[in-house]
Image (tube, rainbow, N blue to C red):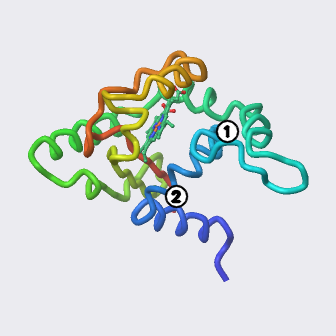
Amino acid sequence: MYPASDLFFGLGYAMAQDRLFQMDFYRHVAQGRLSEWFTNLPLGNGIRLVQMDMLLTCFELEARTRAGLEEIPDRERILLERFAAAQAAGKEPAELEYHEVVTEGGEKVFRYIKAIPMAQLCLQCHGTDIFLETQVNIQELYPEDQATGFAVGDIRGAFSVRRPL
Ligand code: HEC
C-alpha cells in the first residue's frame, strides 16, 4: 500500500507525460474558467457552470500563483530557454521535457518539467487572428492578458513538478 501522496505524484507524472489537455483542463477548473470552454452548462440541482466558476474564482488561486511567478527559480528559467532553443532547432515541442534528481540541503529531490506547446485550438485566444467577440471578452475578463501572437507549436510555458524523495 502506497501513501496517497505517492499515488497523486504518479498520477501527476503520468498526466504531464500523456495528458497535457487534462492538465490544462484542471488549470481552467482552478482558475474558475470552465465556462469559457463549455458556456453556462447546467450541472444539475439548479446549479450552473458559471456559479461553480465564480466560487472557484473566490479562492484567487491564480493571483496566488502569479505572485509566485516572480520567484521562478533560475534553474527553471534556464530550462525554458533551452526548450525554446531546442524548438528553434526543429525539435517537436510536445516532446520537450526534462527530469533530474538533485540534492537540496541534504535532501534528495525529484524534478520534472515539461513544455506547454500551443495547439490549433489554443490560437482561438492566444493566436494573432482572434474573433472580435473573443477579444472583447478576454479584455473584459483578463484586462492584463498579453498572451497573444502565438503560433502552433510555440512554447507557452511549462508544467513543473518538484518532489522530495
Ligand atoms: C477561450 C480562450 C482561451 C483558450 C481557447 C485557451 N486559453 Fe490559455 N489563456 C487564456 C487567457 C485569457 C489567459 C490569461 C489569463 C490571465 O491573464 O489571467 C490564458 C493563459 C494561459 C497560460 C498561462 C497561465 C496564465 O494564467 O497566464 C497558459 C500556459 C495557457 N493559457 C495555455 C493554453 C493552452 C496550451 C491552450 C490550448 C490547449 C489554451 N491556453 C487555450 C485564454 C484561453
Q: Quadrant of the N terminus?
A: bottom right
Amino acid type at mark 1 = Gly
> Could you say where residue 25 lies in the image, as x and y percent from the top left?
55, 51
Assess whether mark 2 and mark 1 are in contact (beta carbons under 8 angstroms): no
SS label for mark 2: helix
Give the residue drawn at x 37%, y 54%: 102
The image quadrant of residue 132 is: top left
Q: Is residue 1 above or below residue 18?
A: below
Amino acid type for the residue under numbered disc 2: Gln
- The percent coordinates of residue 50 (x first, y second) are 74, 39
- Which dot marks residue 32? 1
| 132 shown above or below 34 | above
- Picture coordinates of residue 37 (x, y %)? 57, 44
Judge by depth and name the residue closer to the eye, 120 or 66: 120
Left of 45 or right of it: where is 64? left
Q: Which residue is mark 2?
A: 22
